[in-house]
Image: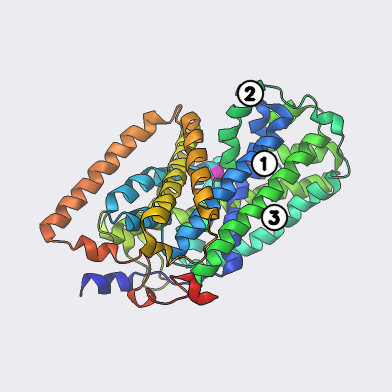
Amino acid sequence: MSSQQGRDENSLAREMGLFGAMSTVVAGTLGAGLFVTLGTASSTTGPSVILVVVLSGILAMSIAVNYSWMATIFPAAAGSYAYVSRTFDSRLPGFLVTWSKWLGYMAADAVLALGFGSYLQVFYPAVDPKIAGFALLTVLFLVNIVGTKEYSVSQNAIFAVLMLAILVLVIPGSFSVDPANYQPFFTGGFDGFVAAAVPLFYAYIGIAVAGQMGAEVKNPSRNLPLAMVGGTFVLIVLYIWTAAVIYGVVGDYTVLANSDRPLATAAEAFLGDSATAVVAFGGLLATASSVHAVMAAGIKMPYSWSWDEVFPKQFSATNDRFGTPHWSLLTLYVVAAGLTFWSTGLSQALAIATFSYLIAYCAVSVTLLYVRWNRSDLVEQAGFDYGWLTPVTGVVGAVGAAGLLSEAYKGSLSIYVPWLAVGVVVFSVYWYLGQQRGTDVGAILDTLPGVASDEREDPTVRGGPSDD
């Protein structure tokens, strides 16, 4: 069997529609952002965290446009890995960009699972968050292993109920705002305002998660941009609206800054017990949906490395019955489940998750600029062309992500550098083995991870102009 035949057999099925992709972006991002970070980020800047949400949203939208444009050229699994490696015709830069992000995904899944356990304690105080988090990971592991269609259906259902839980808070809350509660607006000066930017941007950290599943989205040249840009717009509206409400109804912002469940805390200030319970239930759904999306997206990186023969081949093997990369999924599940029982160092692991996401966002933005100025052949394959807009968003994304990296690196390098060194060793070993076998790297880079060869020329898969 030829190498290409093996890839075709392990390609992924396009079973996710537009709503599933958008719910992956929105519901998969809300967990840590809306239900935790909106409160904790205010500890350094007070109610002006609302303005940080706006500015972070501008950066997030720029990055979403950058990813969605690149996704129409390379609608493959693992998003940023495919965009970088195929643009520069080299597997190494894409691997380095996404290696640390893989660790970040596994750590984030563990922390979000623990967050689910914490929200569950609102209803069942005796529950151990670690046991609850492990149970959630196990259930979602089983859902993900049976395929993208089942993932999409379950995520859509979570998304619908989650929106209801949020609206229960923000609609009546909009009529209970006291403008006096916004004073003083800036409590930590410029330094405090900047310090809030990194944790607040974590609230947008999943905006490109649909790009990780680019090989499983139907009509990706249309649906990926709509999902990423549309989903990010929904997030921006929800974050700004919710931040304005919770800081407008709570007289002392430090109450929210010190709360593990700021939305439930805000609901207690003006809603009855039943409504507060609905909001707390929304926290359960938000953390669960984030775990769900991170798990579904996080397995695509080792799958794509394996597809490109720089990682063990088992990781690109798909389940005979369900067509899912089961070894990749099992690895993520085992590591994340193990981390739920290891609390030491998880906050630092989250820091490296944010740091690694920012590296990927900066790299993809720079890659977009390179394509616009040096790869006219790829520009012609893009699904949309907004003229001057994409170069502007490319600059905003690159400069903004680099600026946040200058803050986010603190406390991250002690994990990032050793982990990156391990990645370089892994890549070097498989590169050497490939050299010994006479691997045709050019032929590999002419494929898209997760995409069967007969789909390459399909206008609904790659190259959006034909969709007009």
Residue under circle 1? 54
Q: Residue at x 61, y 45 (%)?
A: 58
Quarter of the figure that contains the N terminus: bottom left
Residue 236 vs residue 264, the one in the foreground? 236
Q: What SS does tag 2 mark?
A: helix
Per the model, the C-alpha gap separating discs 2 and 3 is 34 Å
Find residue 284 and report its horizontal and vertical position in percent: 65, 49
Kindly identify which numbered label has been placed on residue 229: none
Q: Residue at x 23, y 66 (%)?
A: 443
CB within 8 Å, label 2 to label 3: no
CB within 8 Å, label 1 to label 3: no
Residue 232 vs residue 14, the one in the foreground? 232
Task: Decide if residue 188 is in sight here.
Answer: yes
Who comes first in sequence, dot 1 or dot 2?
A: 1
Q: Amino acid at mark 2?
A: Phe
Left/right placement of residue 451 relative to residue 432 reads right
Q: What SS does tag 3 mark?
A: helix
Quarter of the figure that contains the C terminus: bottom right
Q: Residue at x 28, y 40 (%)?
A: 422
Count of labels in the image: 3
Span shown in magenta? 112-119
- The verdict on residue 254 being magenta is no
* Label 1 Cα neighbours within 10 Å, binned few <14 / some 14-19 / many ≥20: some
* Label 3 Cα neighbours within 10 Å, binned few <14 / some 14-19 / many ≥20: many
Q: What SS does tag 1 mark?
A: helix
Q: Amino acid at mark 1?
A: Val
Residue 307 vs residue 402, the one in the foreground? 402
Residue under circle 2? 190
> From what the image shows, is residue 108 above or below residue 6?
above
> From what the image shows, is residue 304 above or below residue 248?
below
Residue under circle 3? 162
Who comes first in sequence, dot 2 or dot 3?
A: 3
